[in-house]
Image: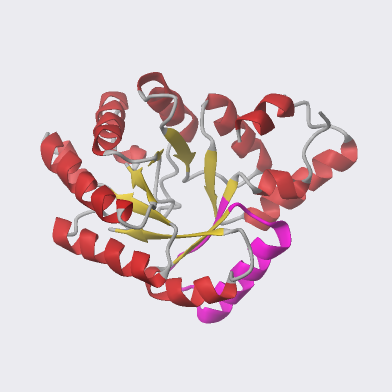
Amino acid sequence: MSPPTVAELAKLIDHSVIDPFHTENDLREGVALAKKYKTGQFVTQPFRVKQARELLKGTDIKLQTFVGLPHGSDHTAVKVLQASLALEDGAQEIDMVINISALLSGDVKYVEDEIKAVVETAKRYDVVVKAIIEVFFLNDEQVKTAGLAAERAGVGFVKTSTGTKPDRVPDVERAVKVLRSVLKPTTVIKASGGCYTTDAIVTYYRAGARRFGAFETAKILEGYEELLLRGATGLDWDTIMDDM
């Protein structure tokens, strides 16, 4: 198989417009970019889910939003309510920040029970949940513990980071490898917090990630287009596209 087109690579990306300074105009521009490149998913702020759903109508782009961002310290009932409201508004995937404080305190049961509460809520809508474990706060053993707790709670994905702290870029490649070493093959790893270039996405893919959260989607895809023009991909895309 020849290397994928820019549009095929875009299917690996969750294009995100979630910063607090992002406006309605940013939302519209973000949706336009997602449509242009046919990204697999689009991520928006919770209060904009209904509007984003309308803007994405007629496409196969999945709409995502988040609960518990950025710190994961909300009460469980609040996270469940956030998820319920997002699902009612049309969200098709939920990214949930786990309670980092509880994890670091050794209260794994609290972490697992909370994730399960959100997962059970999403199941009523046949929607998958991703658990965000914020790896730059964790050592390798804590990464494993968080990932396994999320898996037991029934998530479809474990995600490395919220990507909201540009001053603290986590070692995403290492975290992905650690997670892949303990999680079931059916539990997908989403890399986030360092997906700024095409090379980064390829690196994280080789480490075991199969989904990528990105703000710099246009830059990534334009960079990949340049690689195609130079004929310099050098990637095993047969395997990659078969696994998608």
Image quarter of residue 146: top left
State whether residue 207 appears in this view. Answer: yes
Q: Quadrant of the C terminus?
A: top right
> Which residue does the image show at 88% across and 34% down from the upper left?
231
Q: Quadrant of the N terminus?
A: top right
Establish if 132 lies above or below 87: above
Q: Nearer the viewer, residue 60 or 66?
A: 60
Is residue 217 shown in magenta?
Answer: no
Q: How many numbered discs sit on the rendered protein? A: 0
Image quarter of residue 156: top left
Chain part drawn in magenta: 14-40
Q: Nearer the viewer, residue 240 or 19?
A: 240
Q: Is residue 164 left or right of residue 231?
A: left
Establish if 209 lies above or below 219: above
> Which residue does the image show at 59% across and 48% down from the upper left?
13
Is residue 23 shown in magenta?
Answer: yes
* x and y, in percent, of residue 144 in the image: 30, 26
Residue lying at the far bottom of the rendered structure = 24
* x and y, in percent, of residue 205 in the image: 58, 31
Residue lying at the far top of the rendered structure = 181
State whether residue 99 appears in this view. Answer: no
* x and y, in percent, of residue 100 in the image: 22, 44
Q: Is residue 244 left or right of residue 148?
A: right
Q: Is residue 22 left or right of residue 3?
A: left
User: How is the rendered protein coloured?
Assistant: secondary structure
* x and y, in percent, of residue 199 in the image: 66, 36
> Which residue does the image show at 43% across and 29% down from the upper left?
186
> Which residue does the image show at 51% across and 27% down from the upper left?
208
Image quarter of residue 155: top left
